[in-house]
Amino acid sequence: MRYLPLTDADRSAMLSTIGVASIDDLFAELPKAKPVFDLPNRKTELDVERLIAGFARENLSCADAPSFLGAGNYRHHTPASLDHLIQRGEFLTAYTPYQPEISQGTLQTIYEFQTQVALITGMEVANASMYDGATACAEAAAMACRVTRRNQVLLSGSVHPHYRDVTETQLKHLDLGIECLAPDPLGVEDLIGRVDDSLACVVVQNPGFFGHLKDYAALSQACQAAGVLLVVCVAEPVSLGLVTPPGAMGADIVVGDGQSLAGPASFGGPGVGLFATREKFIRQMPGRLCGETVDEDGQRGFVLTLSTREQHIRREKATSNICTNSGLIALAFSVHMTLLGEAGFTKLAEVNHAKAVSLAERLDDIGGIKVLPQAFFNEFAISLPRPAAEVAEDLAARRILGGVPASRLYPTFDELENVLLVTATELTSDDDMDKLIAGLSKVL
Amino acid sequence: MTDVTAETSKTTFTGNRGLRFEEPLIFELDSPGATAVDVDEPAHGKDRLGGLRRRDGIGLPGLSEPEVVRHYTRLSQKNYSIDSGFYPLGSCTMKHNPRLNEKMARLPGLADIHPFQPVSTVQGALRLMDTLANWLKELTGLPAVALSPAAGAHGELCGLMAIRAAHQANGQDSRSVVLVPESAHGTNPATAAICGYSVESIPANASGRVDLDALKARLGDDVAAVMITNPNTCGLFEVDARAIADAVHAAGAYFYMDGANFNAIVGRVTLAELGVDAMHINLHKTFSTPHGGGGPGAGPTVLSEALAPFAPVPFVVHGAKEMRLAEHADGEDAPNSFGRMKGFQGQFGVFVRALSYMLSLGKDGLRQASGDAVLNANYLRVRLAEELTPAFDGICMHEALFDDRFLKGTGVSTLDFAKAMIDEGFHPPTMYFPLVVHGALLMEPTETESKETLDQFCEAVLALARKAKQGDQAEAFLAAPELTPRRRLDETQAARKPVLRWKPQDLPQAAE
Amino acid sequence: MKLLSLRSVKAASEVYAPVSGTVTEGNGALADAPDTVNSDPTGGGWFFKMTLNDAGQLDELMDQAAYDAYLKDLDA
């Protein structure tokens, strides 16, 4: 077997050193019954490639069709150097940096990542990553309850339904209350009127799930007056290159998913949860933190720090049970941010917005289609004259991935049946838009 | 032995030391306006940002592509990795990561698919998930698996949430306690706590296993579940596993097995035989998806018949014509699901890598892998016993546990000893864990190391032990490591005055 | 009852009230110099002052001599 270096001669020599006759003797404590597995035996590299390629062939890759899909997972162009750098074995095959003297590479990249996340969200500090945006949102709600010592959460209809579901699942197990407002395709929900001092936090998303961009400064003031934390989710971090960041609106905790900048859609995972907050809350934060310090010779270096929050030390009193996070995807996010720099990042965001505005104008011109948000970034909901799921299927049959039907995520809300989420990015060409418009004209 | 004194004391004008480079932060390499990504000029038109255009600059540094590539290449060289050396970090399973798996995960038909494409356009992805699920069910003998948990601790949470849902369905939600052995990973008690349970510890017996009598004495109608790692964190098989399961079931509780160490027994026993109700499988350990400096992982959780109805969404459902996804708890495909714990369809990119690895090894290769892993660990145990002190007598599983009795009176601590291994070119074992052993050193060689590597490691560690025992060596060990990019770091300062991000020099640092 | 938690770099532990009563003062100086707990545990490293509900509870606790003897016993 190509991954196993021991030869039969090695095995015999080692068994005699140990003083047992066979490898099976090392397992003498296991139940005697020998299980039989209905599975194939080993395969050559070539055979594995053929098998896996067979799965790949049965999918319609977004690379082979005009794609307008988003809803929390976005395709962007990734520079070739990004994938090269994250595949360096020293990053790819290292463990969590528990031995700082021989992990300065990973540690410094985490420190840079934390700084980048803090800068783009407009917050003071960020952690080393969570699993994804949805779990980060759940952690933020739980943290807000710890900070405020309150046990009720209000979640806006602007929040991605997966973020909502994961948060709801987590909070009910902590015996914390959560009220989830109905989906808000028109962006008319009143949150300020619902803020009172029984709440630990209000959770919103910007841009919202249906694309609406909103100014949450007034909500933040209302929250602050009532001692309520404002949690803002950002499902598309590219927006932060162009849009006022949550920190500038007064957010207390910002969470999001860095997938869109980190790499391929990959059917939705792995992503990377972003988590940023105010410095005064750091001891209540979940997840790893990297900090700057010095070594014995007085040289700057980095270590994992404030570990007494974490499960390996604090056990049942930890702020979270998270151990493995999303290190490599955080690195990919960070490398991409570094490649872009301020100039590239802001321009990329401009291009995304310009493409979306252009697409919105073209769609609005089609009879029976209405663009719902007035203000948006690179994604917006449209209402169609017939069920969006059927339209999406009909477009897919023409090899156009035309958008995400809201009903896919909200199957029980009949009023969303005709709503489709449409995204345009720097990858969206004029030709792609032409094909979508032409396709819609045929299937509507 | 080479004399390194001259090399270490030599100073250079740059601070670089030959191939070892000093590397600033990206923020210190800033050329304002520079970028490594050329983006087309945006079409000019009216914006639709509703007045929410960013007003202030962000503060991101600008670098060109060659500068970025060099920055990360130099940083990578400051890392120890499984590609570059022996990494016997106990409990973490640092085995070779085949690059075939990376290549497969990057096929456009797998990497470039969106979680909300019409399911008719992703039948291959669903079939791949279903194939992975079948492998995991077959290898464990349990009837169901939840693929979506993102890591081991997340899988633990999945198992406990399913257990709590089952108790609720049976009118047993008053059960509020989860029992965890004192040798457990910290994630076990932390997970139980965030699932709303209180945690009680069960002691180990003299042979390093769960004390069955103490466990039985504690079981009662307030106990919801027992979480046991098997093989346990001492590297030992829990010989009473079946008896534990029977006692737990008789008391009306469920048996959660922490599968962090499943790599030791894969292909040799089924969980059904051990009476397990739920177990997570770290794909990034047993099935060799790369650790990536801390993740991502995946923690699919197999479930018994009793827990299967409560599995979280999403999961793949076989339809009449095609496969579909159950994406909604309460929906017709998942009426009893406890909910959702992860966005989208789980760690799909990790699934591809793990399946590629499983197909490569096959059932015979997996059995050989667990055999070689256990053989390698026992070889270390026996060879190192010449100078070190194994914590327990007898055969171990995939990892060998030593305590610090061999250092008694030397003035050298477990930490110092581990740091000295770094100068010899090895990643240290897990230190001071499990807590049930004094000054623990937990070594997991894995099956992907050659006998030559193990021999080299043994000779170095034995030489270090003999050196420590000479006496009067405490200071030399305390000074280690000396040949690394950084020497021991001041963790106290880092915790006392946290500096968690770069800030421009001229701005005052915010208060701690 | 748990009164405070002590956190070092790699460990955290709880400090429980040895007797019942009312806390009247905390040692704020420890926030800036927590190492005083190690360097001067019976002097400047004090955690809190309290008034006792029942001074008789002190009789159940060890004094310095008894504690020294207890530690010696653990070593043996």
Image (cartoon, coloured by chain):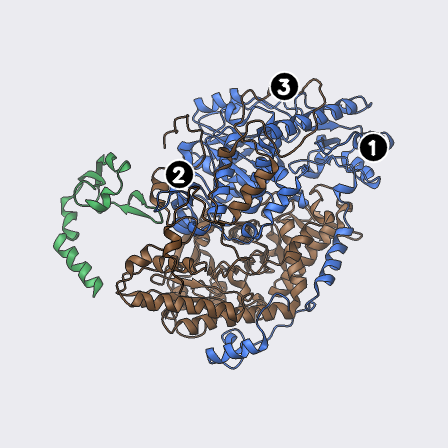
Residue type at the position of mark 1: Lys
Separation (CA) of disc 2 from disc 1: 52 Å
Chain ID, mark 3: B
Q: Residue furthest right?
A: A442
- Which of pointers 2 and 1 lies earlier in the amino acid sequence? 2
Residue A283, disc: 2
User: Where does residue B441 sit, x and y in percent of width and height?
Assistant: 39, 62
Tell if the residue under mark 2 belongs to the same chain as the one under mark 1. Answer: yes
Q: Residue furthest left?
A: C65
Which quadrant is home to the C terminus of chain A? top right
Would you name the residue on which mark 3 appears? B50
> Tag 2's secondary structure?
helix
Separation (CA) of disc 1 from disc 3: 29 Å
Q: Is residue A62 above or below residue A344?
A: below
User: Where does residue A382 sit, x and y in percent of width and height?
Assistant: 73, 27
Chain ID, mark 1: A
Closest to the observer, A385 or C67: C67
Colour chain C appears in: green
Mark in the foreground, 1 or 3? 1
Would you name the residue on which mark 1 appears? A435
- Name the side, left or right, on which C15 lies relative to A420: left
